[in-house]
Image (cartoon, rainbow, N blue to C red):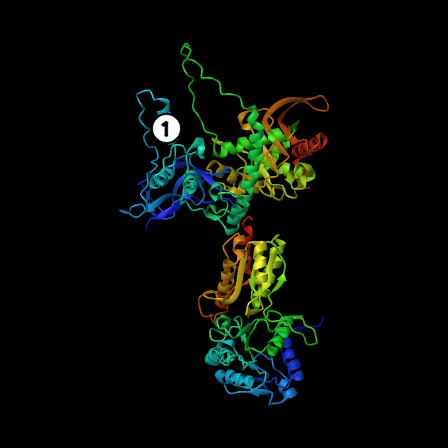
């Protein structure tokens, strides 16, 4: 199959959806002539014109509000927040309006839009351009939260998100933009709320999101050489969460490591750990559930410190080896 | 702050160490880094160093106690400070209990035996209000240890057992009380594997009982007292078979039983070897140790072993059966006799080293062996062993192979002898007897003979070593 990058897969999803559906339009900062800070919308203004690829002033609340308004009147907007950090400025629109409107109108209104945003550290962009805030939205009923980890999932999940009738927070990762992977040329959908076993294994379960899926896969290669077979599960959609494959895997392996880049304290890993502990999978645990997350600090500007602020392959290896060493 | 002194872990697989002796007494001041106790693992004696400066206090174990690694063995206090949990102090050299004048009744004797317990075990039992009588001791000579007391306590109502959920489920399903199961996880946590092992052993035990039950004979009636002329008891000194001695005993017994030893002897004229030794010693600097005949022998052995790979091998059991590992490098074990037993430090890659370097390493290893300061990795991975008793005037001897190695060379003394040369002329030559003891499972007689022939050749013409 043809291989393209993660950011190209996103651009292709946008292009194909916009070609097919006139109600889909893009809105964000510098997404038109400039093509977006990471090039996700490059060339689309030439294809679809200023009316469907709209540059805005620097107002994240405005972008989110415009998306909600347009969605209520029958459009399927795709907004872009240049850095996930600045989605904080649109919280009222997203949490109080987008998430609630459908319920406040007794199901008679719907708010179908997607808000794309790149999160994550690793680019030396310091504390205000490196946040991983996905769990803020996971906490809000009425929103969906999607975090693709591969080019294939990025395209399929974005198309499915645009077609979904609910507001979707679509979290990309800056370091993933350049990774390549097989992506079909035609349109396809990766269903929301379907966790995926990306690597089968029997010795321990690693639940990872976004870039941590890639790091877990790298770690698993090394572990396999040591005779440790890690099963890796990517939830892909964080809310609503499909926890079945995770619980089944824990029953099989008895050991689980959860890895995400966001700060560990009150991070998404806590939710996964709690679901395991509350379920019948608990009775199959051979070790306490382990979590790897970002340190309890803002992302440092210094590249070395930045590197150590979030889980890396070697951290995953160490945790996995410790878990695997316990006899079953 | 009171600082804990813990039993250190010197080796990856080490679980316990025995306290050989306390080098400091409770109440003595110690400096950070100063040795405070000598301990022994299976392999080597090591010293426990003070982690900080202060007053040594609360020695929790007696000499001879076997202590799990990371267990607190003592505290170091600031002047005037108290140990965190005042416990009975195991005083080094404490006075022996005064002899009971009256004849002890059997019941009294028994109760005295029953309270053989480590101070820590006693304290835990006392705090829990537990009688020590009746507890089965698992320590040396039946001494009750902390583990024994905790095992009893955990069986009492309210005693909590650390177990992973999977182990609890298995135990529940099998109807097993977790208190019966010994945990192998961190802090004695019961893993599901422990429950499975327990179930398997219970099954095995059940089979044994059924088999053994009919054979059980009735207890003989106690003998009526017979007056016998009193014979003075034999005097003896009991030396417990512990630590290094126990390991040596076990390994050598196993080797003698498992490996069919063949012994081949060869006599070597060491005139040239001695000449080489003398030459080498003229080349050494003042700081370098002298090159001994053992060093020349080590070099010659490495040379001959490279030509006879089946002597430089390990016989190993694997799940697929036994296999012979022909080892690429020669790690030469040099037996060193100590007061408490034999230790065999290893010169790694001896085949790559010259006489002066070998002399340096052998000197360093044997010196530290005598000071009990070898690191565990320095006695591991030997591929062949050299044992020299020549300094005792021993002419020749045989030795037991050190498994998984397959051969050992027993070196006798050098003695001048009157010989006849090829023209029947009388000559006097320094002669050495070498005995090769090899495992016949791996080494055939002819293979052993070829090795000895090569060894003799190179010792009698050491220039060949450059080959």
Residue found 50% across the figure and 58% down from its top: A277
Task: Find residue B357 and report its horizontal and vertical position in percent.
Answer: 56, 43
For label 1, count other residues whose C-alpha is less than 10 Å away and answer few (under 14), some (14-19) or many (20+).
few
Disc 1, SS: helix
Above or below for A103 versus B450: below
User: Do we see residue B398 in this rendering?
Assistant: yes
Tell me the quarter of the image containing the C terminus of chain B: top right
Work out whether residue B200 or residue B417 is closer to the camera in this orientation and state it: B200
Task: Find residue B270 and report its horizontal and vertical position in percent.
Answer: 63, 30
Above or below for B418 versus A263: above
Q: Quadrant of residue A73?
A: bottom right
User: Do we see residue B284 in this rendering?
Assistant: no
Work out whether residue A64 or residue B379 is closer to the camera in this orientation and state it: A64
Task: Find residue B286 and report its horizontal and vertical position in percent.
Answer: 50, 41
Work out whether residue B205 or residue A12 is closer to the camera in this orientation and state it: B205
Task: Give the chain letter at badge 1.
Answer: B
Mark 1, residue position: B111
Query: In the image, B142: left or right of B362?
Result: left
Residue found 70% across the figure and 73% down from its top: A184
Task: Find residue B320 and report its horizontal and vertical position in percent.
Answer: 68, 41
Residue found 42% across the figure and 11% down from its top: B226
Work out whether residue B453 or residue A326 is closer to the camera in this orientation and state it: A326
- How many numbered discs sit on the rendered protein? 1
């Amino acid at each position: 199959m043809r291989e393209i990058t993660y950011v190209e897969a996103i651009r292709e999803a946008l292009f194909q959806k916009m070609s097919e559906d006139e109600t889909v339009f893009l809105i964000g900062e510098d997404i038109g002539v400039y093509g977006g800070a990471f090039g996700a919308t490059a060339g689309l203004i030439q294809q679809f014109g200023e009316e469907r690829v709209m540059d805005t002033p620097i107002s994240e609340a405005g972008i989110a509000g415009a998306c909600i308004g347009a969605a209520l009147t029958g459009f399927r907007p795709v907004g872009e927040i240049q850095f996930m950090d600045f989605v904080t400025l649109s919280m009222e629109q997203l949490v109080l309006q987008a998430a609630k409107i459908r319920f406040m109108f007794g199901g008679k209104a719907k708010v179908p839009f997607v808000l794309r945003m790149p999160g994550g550290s690793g680019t030396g962009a310091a504390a205000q351009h490196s946040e991983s805030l996905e769990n803020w939205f996971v906490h809000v009923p009425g929103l969906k939260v999607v975090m693709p980890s591969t080019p294939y999932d990025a395209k399929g999940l974005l198309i499915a998100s645009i077609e979904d009738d609910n507001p979707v927070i679509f979290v990309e990762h800056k370091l993933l933009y350049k990774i390549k992977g097989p992506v079909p040329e035609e349109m396809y959908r990766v269903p929301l709320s379907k966790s995926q076993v990306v690597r089968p294994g029997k010795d321990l379960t690693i639940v990872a999101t976004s870039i941590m899926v890639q790091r877990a896969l790298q770690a698993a290669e090394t572990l396999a050489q040591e005779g440790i077979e890690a099963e890796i599960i990517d939830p892909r959609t964080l809310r609503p969460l499909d926890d079945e494959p995770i619980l089944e895997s824990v029953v099989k392996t008895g050991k689980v490591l959860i890895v995400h880049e966001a700060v560990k304290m009150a991070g998404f890993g806590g939710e996964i750990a709690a679901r395991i502990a509350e379920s019948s999978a608990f009775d199959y645990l051979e070790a306490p559930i382990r979590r790897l997350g970002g340190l309890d600090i803002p992302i440092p500007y210094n590249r070395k410190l930045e590197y150590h602020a979030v889980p890396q392959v070697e951290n995953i290896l160490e945790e996995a080896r410790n878990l695997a060493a316990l006899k079953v | 702050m009171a600082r804990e002194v813990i039993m250190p872990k010197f080796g990856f697989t080490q679980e316990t160490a025995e306290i050989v002796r306390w080098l400091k007494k409770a109440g003595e001041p110690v400096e950070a880094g100063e040795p405070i106790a000598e301990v022994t693992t299976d392999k080597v004696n090591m010293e426990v160093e003070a982690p900080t400066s202060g007053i040594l206090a609360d020695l929790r174990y007696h000499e001879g106690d076997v202590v799990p690694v990371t267990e607190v063995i003592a505290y170091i206090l600031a002047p005037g400070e108290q140990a965190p949990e005042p416990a009975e102090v195991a005083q080094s050299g404490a006075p022996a209990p005064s002899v009971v004048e009256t004849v002890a009744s059997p019941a009294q004797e028994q109760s005295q035996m029953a309270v053989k317990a480590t101070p820590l075990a006693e304290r835990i039992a006392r705090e829990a209000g537990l009688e020590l009588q009746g507890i089965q001791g698992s320590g040396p000579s039946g001494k009750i240890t902390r583990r024994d007391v905790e095992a009893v306590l955990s069986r009492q109502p309210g005693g909590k057992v650390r177990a992973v959920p999977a182990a609890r489920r298995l135990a529940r399903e099998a109807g097993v009380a977790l208190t019966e199961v010994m945990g192998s996880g961190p802090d004695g946590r019961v893993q599901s594997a422990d429950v499975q092992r327990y179930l398997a052993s219970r099954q095995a035990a059940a089979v044994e009982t059924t088999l053994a039950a009919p054979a059980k004979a009735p207890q003989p009636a106690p003998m009526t007292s017979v007056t016998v002329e009193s014979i003075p008891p034999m005097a003896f000194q009991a030396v417990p078979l512990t630590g290094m001695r126990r390991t040596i005993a076990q390994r050598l017994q196993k080797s003698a039983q498992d490996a069919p030893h063949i012994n081949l002897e060869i006599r070597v004229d060491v005139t040239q070897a001695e000449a080489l030794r003398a030459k080498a010693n003229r080349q050494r600097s003042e700081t370098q140790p002298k090159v001994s005949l053992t060093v020349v022998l080590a070099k010659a052995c490495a040379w001959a072993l490279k030509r006879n790979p089946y002597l430089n091998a390990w016989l190993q059991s694997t799940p697929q059966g036994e296999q012979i590992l022909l080892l690429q490098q020669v790690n030469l074990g040099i037996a060193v006799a100590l007061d408490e037993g034999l230790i065999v430090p290893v010169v790694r890659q001896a085949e790559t080293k010259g006489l002066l370097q070998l002399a340096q390493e052998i000197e360093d290893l044997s010196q530290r062996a005598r000071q009990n300061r070898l690191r565990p990795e320095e006695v591991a991975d030997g591929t062949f062993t050299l044992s020299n008793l020549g300094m005792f005037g021993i002419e020749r001897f045989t030795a037991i192979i050190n498994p998984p190695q397959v051969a050992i060379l027993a070196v006798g003394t050098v003695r001048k002898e009157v010989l006849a040369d090829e023209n029947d002329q009388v000559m006097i030559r320094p002669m050495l007897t070498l005995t090769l003891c090899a495992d016949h499972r791996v080494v055939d007689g002819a293979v052993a003979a070829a090795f000895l022939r090569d060894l003799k050749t190179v010792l009698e013409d050491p220039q060949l070593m450059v080959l």
